Structure formats: C-alpha cells, structure tokens
Amino acid sequence: MKLLKSFVTIVIAALLLAEYSYAQGIENKLNLMPMPVKVELTGGEFRLNQNFKVEIKGNPAERLYGATSRMLRRLSQRTGLFFTQDYLHKDSTCQNPDFIIDAKRPGKVRLYEDESYELKVTESHVLLKAATDIGALRGIETFLQLLEADSSGYYFPTVNIEDYPRFPWRGLMIDACRHFMPVDVIKRNIDGMAAVKLNVFHWHLSDDQGFRVECKSFPNLTKMGSDGLYYTQRQIKEIIKYANDRGIRVVPEFDLPGHSTSWFVGYPEYASAPGPYSIERNFGTFNPTFNPTIEKTYKFLDEFFGEMSKLFPDDYMHIGGDENNGKQWSANREIQSFMKKNNISDNNSLQSYFNKRLLTILTKYHKKMIGWDEILQPDMPKSIVIQSWRGEKSIKEAASKGYQVIRSNGYYIDLNQPASYHYLIDPSPDSLKLSNSERKNIIGGEATMWSEFVSPENIDSRIWPRTAAIAERLWSPKNIVNVRDMYRRLNEISLELEDIGLTQIKNQSMMIRRLSNGYDITALTNFVNVIEPVQGYRRIVQVPDFKSYYPMTKVVDAAVPDAKTARNFRYLVDDFLAGNIQDENRIKKIYNDLELWKNNDAKLQEVVKKSPVLNEIEPLSIELANISIIGIQALDAIKNKTKVETNWVKESLEKIKEAKQSKAQVELRVVTPIEKLIRRAGNI
C-alpha cells in the first residue's frame, strides 16, 4: 500500500511539474497578462488586414456591442489600418465575418458571475465563445494582447485558449479623499482594470480629508466637507454605467465610525465630542468619531444610506471601520455611562454594537456589509465580509470562522514595493493551513491605492503597471510564478495600458520637464531611472507635517516604484556573477550603465543651477557618480582577475553604506548590485 501511495505521489508530482513547465513555456512566448488557465499554440498566424470584420451571436447585453466597437478602434489605433466596419449594434449584419463572438446570455455585474471564455484563433478565422457577455469581455482583452507584428504586417498567433478566474473578487481601491481624483482619472483606471480582468472598483469616498459624494439629504457633507471637490450624483451614475459596460462592479466605501472628520464639519452633532470641526489637512489617524450611543446618529445614517443605496446598485456597501483610536469615546462621560449601563466592556465592543446597528440599516436597504478587519468581533454575524489589511493572522481567523474574506494585505501599492513582492503573495497561501471549505471563504483580493502622496498626474504611475501583476495573481493558476517572465510581460502590458489612456509612462516625462525647467531632460531622466520613492510609510515619517494641499511635483513624485532601468541592472549583475565572468556581452552592458551614471552628475549639475527645486537631490547624484566609478574598478578587477587592496574594499563599502541612505524621500536602487561587484572583487 505504501509503495502504491509513493507511486501515485510521484506521478502526481510529475504531472504538476509538466503542467508548470508547460505554463512557463507558454509564458515565454506570449505577452498575456493575466496568463490564461490553458493555452495551446498551434504554430500558425491569422493575418490582420483592413477587411477584418466581427459578428456577434447569442444573446448578450448591449455592452458587448460597445466593447466590440472599442476593440475595433483599439486595433485600428495600434495598427493604422482603416477597418471598413464601423460601430456594432444589435441590428448589425456582417457577411463572412473573420471574428465571431458568441455569448449565450447577458451577464450580471455581480459576485460569482460566470467570466469564463474560450478563444480559438486559426489561420482563417477567430472564434470567441462565452457563457455570458462578461466572459466575452474578458476574452476580447486576451485577443487584443495576442497582437504581434513583423515586417509583413500585423497578425495573431494561432492558439486555443480556455480561461476562467481563480477568484471571483478581483479589485482595485482608489482613495479619492486624501487627494481628490477627477472623473477622467477614475474612468481611465477603470479601463486599465478591464484590460487586466479586474472586476471590482472599490471607491473610497469619505475620510478625514474630504467627503466626496453629493448627498441631497445632507448637503453640508459636500458644501462644508469637501473644499468643493466631490462627485455629483450625475457623475456617480455616469461612472457606474462606464464600469458596468466593462463588466466591473462599483463598491463605495463610507468610512466610519473613525476617519470621519469631514462628516462633522457640516454635522458636528453626530460626533463624540463637541465641535466645531474643520477638514483635516494632515495625514494619519485622528480622534473624531461618530457617537454610537445616541439614536439620532442612527436616524442620520439610516437616511444617508437609504439615499446612497439607491445611487449605488451593487449588493455590497463598505463601511470602513478601521483605525478608530477610541479617544473621544473614552473621554465622553455620557458614552462611558452608556457602556456601563449596557454591559459594554470596552471600545472594541462598543464598535461592534455600532456595526451591528449599522448592519441592520444596510440589511434594510438590501446591502451586504464589508469592512476592514477591525470589524471582525466575536459577536458579528457571518453575513459580513472582512477585507484584511493587517496580515494573514486575521485572514485565517476570519476564514476559519466562516466569514468571507478579501485580501489586501500584501497588495498595498501605495507603499511603493516592487511588482515581484506583490506577485509572490498568494491570496490563499498553503501556510494558512485551512480546510478546503474554509479556504473557499477567501473570495479574492484588492490592490489598494491610498492617496496621501499621489495627485491626478502621477497616480497612474503608482497603480500601473504593478497592479497588472496583482491582477494575474487573482486570476491565473497558482503555479504561474515566474518573476522574470512576469516582468517581461509586464513591460509589454504597460505599453498597452498607455495605449488605452493611462499616463504612467508619458506623465513622468512631463513632470521631469517641469523639474528640469526646460526641454532637455536627459540628465535628470538618467538619474530618475535609477531611483525609487522610499518604501512603506517612511515618507510620512520623513516629512511628518506634510499637508494635503502641498505640491506633488518634486523628484520623489516623478520617480516610480520598481524602476525598470534599476531592476534590469540588478538582474544583469546577478546573471553576470552567477555565470561566466568572461561573458563579454554582459560585461559591456554593465560597463555602459556605469559609465553613463559616472558621467551624468556633471550634466545634472548644470540643470540644478537653473532649477533650485533639484537642490535636494544633488548629494545623491554625486553619490551615484562616485559608486559608479567604484563599480567600474570592481568590474575591471573581476574581469582581469586582479587582486584588490583590503583598504580599497573597506573604503568602497563605506561609500556604499552612505549611498544606501535615502535623501529627498528617494533611494538609489543600483547600490546593492554595485556592492555585489565590490564583494566579488574583494573575495568577501
């Protein structure tokens, strides 16, 4: 029996290895993201020309016709071909179509809707089949990503694809409170979401720094709590329809009982301490909190959520519930008396009481409650959904107790961590040690874009392209984990995202022009290419009194997380040191980079003279030049097998140590590979 079990284990392992290798092989040939579940390349080409025509069959919703028309326009944009077919609608007819889209029924933009599809590309035609038109939307995005070109023109490789998502909840949260994000920012990011098959737009709409939704029942919420920066109800409806047309749900978040200063600017009577209140201009955790012990609070919230429930059609409503420090509750004698009278032992229990009262209101309006993991209290019903930001302990606790869970821990893209970090964090890792039934409670994840340090002109660079890697983690099979190939595909997907209107690439050049005070941006671009904003919450620590109205136009704001040039240099050095040190091609590339950075400082100094805003990065530019010289010396020693002096190694490592220190809220991201060259040269 043991022998049989061992044989079965070996066979299963071999099959898994074969599946893994197969997946990796497909990855290295196609620029798809997320990678589909099953891909079979068949070795041919479907050639694209201006006679390309599409026909829609089945019984789809109207949105599929609009999406197919947009597909034609996107193809036309990318290829320059003048397609004769114009905009599709239900009464459109097509003779001899090249591409047939067959969607059996209208999909509903809701949790657990069928998003599967099958795509078959042959040399003569393309067929996309889906149970719902939402599945067809996902297949259209895969089809567009397949487009390739050669000297003869544009083509699609012939392929058979079967695809469906691993998780039903795949979201992006945008905080429109710390810094307001206009309608065009929201729309273009919804387009980005659709391109990588995300399906939930989580809209953070109230916080200490602003209340962002027009409320006709309580007009002072925006009149006094928004600085005039808010979405009208007409704009909200417009964005909901825009998202719906792309198969994306819109889930609003109104944060309470804490993070609620902006509510009280116009309605201080619902706070736990007397006013007056003013909009918060700093970032952090603050004291203002709803008073959960007075009935008028619940009457107010009942009327408010009644109006918002009509405005936002999704089944789910997010109440926030995070980071309530409880200071106003502890200082309020009447609240303390209420707690004693009702046997409420502490502030956590009082928040649980508040949440249950709020749950009754939301249930009345047929909404399901979502909250950050602070709302997970022992007596909360299993009908609520927990969004976890604090770690796997809370994910395991919630899932094992029967709560549905959305993972955001590890997907905080505002922390400026690399795509590889997010990519290797699984929403439901084996380390949680959950049963199969408990594991099903983890329904997906969300990337979270908190907006303390973003503006409308650089927010795209903080969301994209890294969120595409998170989208793959939420959609694709668990075993798709090749980081190098993820970056190869991510580079291509970033260009496609820019093609649909996102600004993560082009806005950086615009910001650098402003910083350079002129058109010649070469020197500053060379510098920005090898720096990144500090990670985590260090920027808040380094500039503790940062105000919400301060400009986001400095070098740190133009720098991007996970800088491609710096990352490529790190890989280049790692591969060189791991392989043949006589590899002339790699050696030449390393020399070229180091020479560029060595000489760049003198050119950048000329720019600094006419642009004082750059004074703060001058020391880092000098350090980049100095460590590049050291890197060249180390590379010479390695290549020529020359022994270096101990004092040189010691002095070089001291300079490396200094260069690792952040300045102007940015870090040099090529220091570590240069340090590796020094250590190899010194045999340490």
Image: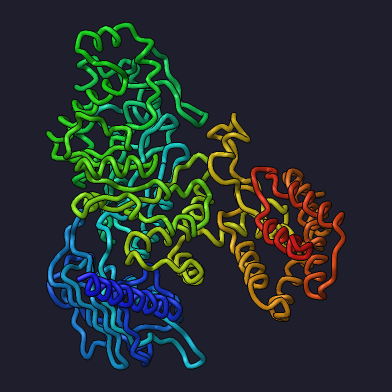
Q: Is residue 73 above or below residue 339?
A: below
Residue 102: x and y in percent read 18, 77
The x, y position of residue 293, in whole percent, is: 24, 15
Look at the image and tell me in which quarter the C terminus lies. Answer: bottom right
Is 561 placed left or right of 196 in the picture?
A: right
Coordinates of residue 550 in the picture (x, y in percent): 59, 36
In-front residue for pair 171/657: 657
Residue 439 placement, left or right of 610: left
Taking depth in this image into account, of 637 and 326 the one nearest to the observer is: 637
User: Is 106 located above or below residue 553 in the figure?
Assistant: below
The image shows residue 384 at horizontal and vertical percentages of 21, 39
To which quarter of the image does residue 519 belong? Answer: bottom right
The residue drawn where x is 49% and y is 59% is 420
In the foreground, 111 or 8: 8
Please count the marks in the image: 0
For residue 178, say whether it is visible.
Answer: yes
Closest to the observer, 570 or 531: 570
Q: Which color mode does the image show?
A: rainbow
284 lies left or right of 474? right
| Residue at the image point whose x is 74% and y is 77% from the top | 588
The residue at 37%/56% (across/down) is: 426
Residue 72 in sight from this viewpoint: no
Name the image quarter holding the N terminus: bottom left
Q: Image check: 299 left or right of 583?
A: left
Is residue 676 placed above or below 551 in the rendered structure? below
